[in-house]
């Protein structure tokens, strides 16, 4: 029986519980803005195609000294140091996952382990004509906000939506601590805009479904914390997957627009036949969703924002409402892996079909 052990780092503002759950569906005992950090170990059984949580441990923590979380002695310091050292020693990249609606703490870690396996990165050879580097699993860090872990009854959606929004401050503080630690602005230079140069290894972000609503709250919190100062451009790639966010979110300053400053590239993967988002649109009284047809308009969006239509390849996803294609459809996994190589401009990603070159693309079914 082939088994693989996968480490997954995490930050969470959930409440601590005993037993197999580790963390529950309520907020940290000190409030929604506080988070803990730790590391889990997940086992993948390739014969059964199954992920199992083996262990989960916390770093020791102390409360932050100020609202930004900067300069405080937190348990996150030990975790960030381990991530930084591993990235440098093994030449690996980091990927932050914000999970969506209906995820338990354990479920979010299992998803993180899956992305660690499926989003393996094969960078360009260092020398022209040199040997192809072996694909490397990214170091995955899951931010697990207190989703209830249930999709029924219908009011669970509204409960999760409120909890995701209230998690914005904790997520923002986590991001800023993570950025500060990896960038080490006290020792590194700045770019032409005065932003601290990022660490030597790429950092990516994946936000799925309602995780994009939490991300919206986080970027607004970061904007308030920065108080007019330039926001670090730390993320190489931001993947907004099946985003349960307004279709104009990336164009509105009070929504996701500040994320444009934080990323070198933003990729919006969407599907008009995503049944979960259709339900969000028609029964939860939400506006048209970003994850259904992509951005409403590109008029205010810079060239590094692109949309990728996944409707043709989400046709078999009836069991999960055609909402999980970012982790379950081979065509989408191949597209993401091609993006992560850094080898291709949007028009050059293999198998993509250009709908509006430089802006909109479609992933066709594999033949």
Image (cartoon, rainbow, N blue to C red):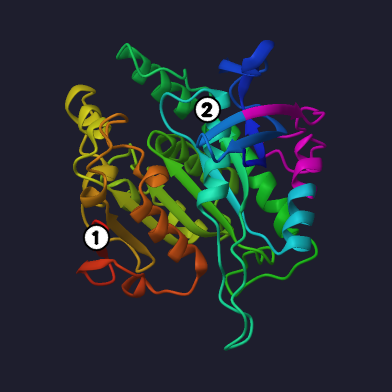
Q: Is residue 5 visible?
A: yes
Comparing marks 2 and 1, which lies closer to the viewer? 1
Residue 211 vertical placement versus 56 (above, below): below
- Where in the figure is residue 290, as x and y percent of width and height? 28, 44
Depth check: give the residue in front, 86 or 236. 86
Query: Which residue in the structure is indicated by mark 1?
Result: 367
Question: Viewed as shown, does residue 17 lie left or right of 147?
Answer: right
Please give the name of the residue rendered at 19% of the width and 40% of the height, measured from the top-left corner: 273
Which stretch did the figure color magenta? Answer: 53-81
Q: Is residue 283 magenta?
A: no
Which percent across, then down, holds residue 22? Answer: 66, 19
Q: List the residue tagged with mark 2.
A: 107
Distance Cα–Cα, label 2 vs label 1 = 32 Å
Residue 69 lies in the magenta stretch: yes
Are there few (<14), some (14-19), or many (20+) residues within 10 Å of tag 1?
Answer: few
Rendered view: 150 above or below 295:
above
Residue lying at the far front in this picture: please name it: 1
The quarter in which the C terminus is drawn is bottom left
Q: Secondary structure at mark 1?
A: loop
- Number of labels in the image equals 2
Q: Earlier in the sequence, mark 2 or mark 1?
A: 2
Q: Which mark is residue 217?
A: none
Q: Position of residue 275 (x, y in %)?
A: 22, 33
């Amino acid at each position: 029986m082939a088994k693989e052990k996968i480490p997954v780092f995490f930050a969470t503002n959930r409440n601590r519980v005993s037993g197999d759950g580790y963390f529950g569906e309520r907020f940290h005992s000190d409030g929604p803005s506080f988070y803990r950090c730790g590391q889990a170990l997940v086992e993948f059984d390739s014969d059964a195609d199954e992920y199992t949580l083996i262990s989960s441990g916390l770093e020791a923590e102390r409360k932050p000294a100020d609202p930004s979380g900067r300069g405080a002695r937190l348990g996150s310091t030990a975790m960030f140091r381990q991530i930084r050292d591993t990235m440098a020693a093994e030449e690996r990249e980091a990927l932050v996952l914000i999970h969506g609606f209906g995820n338990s703490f354990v479920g979010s870690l299992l998803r993180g382990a899956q992305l660690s396996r499926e989003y393996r990165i094969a960078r360009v050879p260092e020398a022209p004509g040199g040997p192809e580097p072996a694909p490397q699993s990214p170091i995955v860090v899951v931010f697990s906000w207190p989703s209830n872990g249930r999709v029924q009854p219908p009011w669970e959606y509204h409960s999760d939506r409120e909890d995701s929004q209230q998690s914005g401050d904790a997520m923002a503080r986590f991001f800023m601590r993570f950025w500060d630690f990896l960038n080490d602005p006290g020792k590194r230079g700045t770019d032409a805009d005065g932003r601290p140069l990022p660490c030597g290894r790429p950092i990516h972000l994946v936000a799925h479904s309602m995780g994009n609503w939490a991300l919206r709250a986080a970027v607004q919190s970061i904007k308030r914390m920065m108080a007019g100062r330039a926001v670090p451009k730390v993320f190489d790639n931001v993947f907004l997957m099946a985003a349960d966010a307004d279709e104009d979110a990336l164009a509105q300053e009070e929504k996701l627009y500040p994320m444009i400053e934080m990323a070198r590239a933003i990729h919006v993967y969407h599907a008009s036949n995503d049944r979960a988002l259709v339900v969000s649109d028609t029964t939860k009284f939400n506006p048209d969703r970003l994850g259904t047809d992509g951005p409403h308009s590109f008029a205010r969006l810079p060239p590094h924002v692109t949309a990728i239509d996944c409707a043709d390849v989400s046709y078999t996803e009836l069991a999960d409402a055609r909402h999980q294609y970012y982790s379950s459809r081979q065509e989408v996994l191949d597209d993401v892996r091609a993006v992560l190589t850094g080898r291709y401009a949007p028009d050059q990603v293999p198998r993509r079909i250009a709908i509006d070159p430089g802006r909109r693309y479609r992933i066709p079914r594999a033949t």
